[in-house]
Amino acid sequence: MFFRITKSLVIVLALAACSAPKKMAKTDTGTTDSLKAHINYLADDKLEGRRTGTAGELLASQYISSKFLSIGLLPKGSSGYVQPFEVNEGKIIGPGTKFSFDGEHLTAGADFFPFPYSANVKMEAMPSIAVQEADMPWFFDLKDVLEENKSNPHFDLKDYIRTNAKKAKDKGASAVILYNTSAADDKLAFDGKDRTEMLSIPVIYLKKEIAGKYLSDPSSTIKIFLSVDVTEKKRTGANVVGYIHNGAANTVILGAHFDHLGYGEDGNSRNTSKVPAIHNGADDNASGTAALIELARKLKASKAKNNNYLFIAFSGEELGLYGSKYFTEHPTIDLKTANYMINMDMVGRLNDSTKTLTIGGYGTSPGWPVFSPTAYRMPNDNKIMPTLNIKIDSSGTGPSDHTSFLQKRYSGVILFYRAAHRLPHPK
Ligand SMILES: [Zn+2]
């Protein structure tokens, strides 16, 4: 869709993207103070890093909702300003997972674990350890295959186990019970991120000490009780969505994610210390969220009425764009009327020497040449932003929420993104 971008919108975005300048026009101190206040609140330790699904994320969403309300935005979530969505954290070993040998109970996780693709079943059986009978659990020692493949870099043990468990099922096994009596470290562990298709039988791994204690005599039979309970762990996050209705045919979507990494529990932190620490996320992305709020205030007060404006503070971004994906699949406006989408991520800290800001998504629409470096650079007599350098990137896909919109092909997307930062975007 072809579109026009007003100069005022560009300047407001540029202003929002600028780190605190030394000289400031009097009329802009209010905006700068507000930007700082938003960032100070969102990045405060009290919010504990705004991890999706936590109390800190809730406080952040309540703060953004209250600002949208005071600015006079219409609520455009699914419940007031908020739009809750579920995040699937992967699989966990549920409390119903149990295993006993001859009445002696083992501890799930410590003594044994089911593979995540195991069928959730309960069974009692009296198998012979060395004999593979129909409708009985089959035991496998991984010793031979590990030794045979110890210098084979292409050997994939997980794939081997899954493939052979399937074969065993086809030959009549009611369960597969694996163990490893070799000296080789098999590195097997429960992997909650394993999304492979479920099998129709359970596949269990026994730790070495347990196998040594109960399975050392292959000629024996043993009474087993097995119950598998592998479940999905879910938590709920929420986008915050506000709207300016100008009665226009088209709507401009402006977005920034407000979630961050919490204490780094999701494994997406670069903190190498063993001590958990709050990841405050002032730049990533309290900065973009603050810009979003102030942009809403400016546009609500402005005479720009040619578009409607939708403001979305996304959550779930750090976990994999969950909030924006959910929004594009459950939009609260007709996305066919969306003119374009502008996303702001890490706009709060420019590299001191290069003072460069990246604008991504330049190639996603023929309408974007308005963002040429010369058009964007502030004139020298403008005290707000004298020396901002713009780096243009034509690709509209990248590790932030604009990608969800581009994938839906509704409109051109633009990402404002801090360039020349030394570390890649957390993912
Ligand atoms: Zn980010």
Image (tube, grey):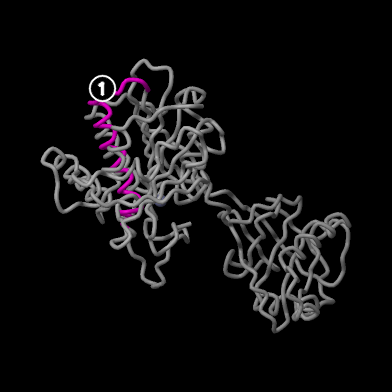
Q: Relative to residue 106, is residue 276 drawn left or right?
A: left
Decide: is 267 above or below 309.
below
Residue 421 % position (x, y) = 38, 60
Q: Which residue is drawn at 49% across and 34% down?
A: 412
Image quadrant in which you'd find residue 248: top left
Residue 352 point in image, percent of width and height: 28, 61
Position of residue 331 in the picture relative to residue 299 (left or right): right
Residue 169: x %, y % from top left: 83, 56
Extreme-left residue of the structure: 26
Q: Position of residue 237 (x, y in %)?
A: 42, 42
Q: In this view, does 178 lie to the left or right of 351?
A: right
Q: Is residue 199 visible?
A: yes
* Residue farthest toward the bottom in the current orientation of the protein: 183
Along the viewing direction, whichever of 235 and 209 lies nearer the viewer: 235
* Crowd tier of the residue under label 1, counting other residues whose Cα lies within 10 Å: few below 14, some 14–19, many 20 or above: few
Q: Do we see residue 346 in this rendering?
A: no
Asked whether mark 1 and ligand 1 are closer than 8 Å, the reply comes as: no
172 w.r.t. 219: above or below = above
User: Which segment did they paint magenta?
Assistant: 280-307
SS at badge 1: loop
Which residue occupies the foreground of this view, 35 or 352? 352
Queried whether the magenta region covers residue 425, the answer comes back as: no
- Amino acid type, residue under disc 1 in the picture: Lys
Q: Residue lying furthest top in this view?
A: 247
Magenta part mainly helix, strand or loop? helix
Figure disc tally:
1
User: In this image, 38 relative to 123: left or right?
Assistant: left
Residue under the image location 86 percent in, 54 percent down = 170
Q: Is residue 305 magenta?
A: yes
Q: Which residue is under mark 1?
A: 303
